[in-house]
Image (spheres, grey):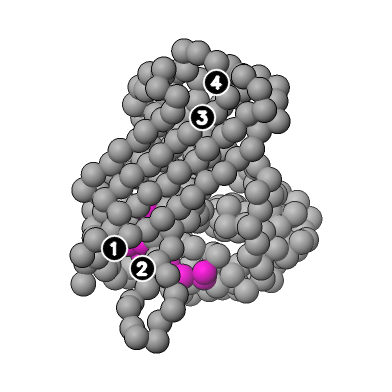
Amino acid sequence: MPVRVAIHHHTQYDYDRVVSLSPHLIRLRPVAHSRAVIESYTLTIKPDNHVVHWQQDPFGNFVARVDFWEPMEMMSIDVDIVALLVPTNPFDFFLDTYAISFPFDYEPQLKKDLAPYLAVDEQGPRLTQWLQTIDQTSQGTIDFLIMLNQRIFQDIAYTTRMEPGVQTPDETLDLAIGSCRDSGWLLVQTLRQFGLAARFVSGYLAQVVPRTPSELKENSLALHAWAEVFIPGAGWLGLDPTSGMLATEGHIPLACTSEPNGAAPVTGTSDVNNTTLSYTNTLEVLD
């Protein structure tokens, strides 16, 4: 049954001296196609002396441009969302006939529209070697996607990585470990190598734990990253290689882009300083 939740995400930057900030771009507002029903959204930024202009990027994502009018020693961002998580069947679609079996070719106009998501940006010997181990024989398209998603889940161990940026596919495969964004980017590039349009997704992962007398786990909220692939008839399908599962109502996209740098939750610069970053994420069930 549907679950109404309150999401709170707090990010704070503490600077060791007074600094000036460049305009910042904040991508922390759910996209229009989110499976979760967004009932309310609030973005709060401190200090108060700033102005926010909401924009849409070339991919249709919501972006808040923030211009700061005075120097500061601290900057914080708070996101509050009330959302209705409606259980969904990730397989509730019909494929166009020509896309039922992999491999297939997109129709010419569709392929032109999907061009940014078909670009192979990363190539290397390790990726080439790994691709050769993937079964590319004729098979059901959905079966192929599930197999590929599971393969990355099995081959790449998960780790929390605080360093900025995304590993190359070769780095992720060599290390056999990566963050969610590293596995997500590996899946995007792998799909493109096989002629499938794919995009990188950053968002929230809201996990509500069913309450039982013996259940000690807590609800959780995290910034997360995964991939989406475009299949004719189904549209964009979310694949989460960190879990090996298809995306569900708990995957709340904030930005969907052709490359990871365009999906970063916060971008901007400051004067040279030592910065301390802290954050908290909370998920509360309201009903």
**Cβ–Cβ under 8 Å for marks 4 and 3:** yes
**Earlier residue among tags 4 and 2:** 4
Residue found at x 58% / y 17%:
20
Asked if the residue at tag 2 contacts the one at tag 3, i.e. Cβ–Cβ closer than 8 Å, the answer is no
Tell me if I can see residue 24 in this picture.
yes
Q: Earlier in the sequence, mark 1 or mark 4?
A: 4
Q: Name which residue type carries label 2.
A: Val
The N terminus is located in which quarter? bottom left
The span shown in magenta is 243-252
Q: Which mark is residue 285?
A: 1
Query: Crowding at label 1, few (<14), some or many (≥20) Cα neighbours within 10 Å?
Result: some
Q: Main secondary structure of the magenta part?
A: loop
Q: Is residue 247 magenta?
A: yes
Residue type indicated by callout 1: Val
Q: Is residue 236 left or right of residue 241?
A: left
The answer to which image quadrant residue 174 occupies is bottom right
Q: Which mark is residue 72?
A: 4
Mark 4 and mark 3: Cα distance apart in space: 7 Å
Q: Can you give x and y, in whole percent of width and height, for residue 187 in the image?
A: 57, 58
Q: Secondary structure at mark 3?
A: strand
Q: Residues within 10 Å of mark 2 (few under 14, many from 20)?
A: some
> Where is residue 78 shown, x and y percent of the image?
41, 39
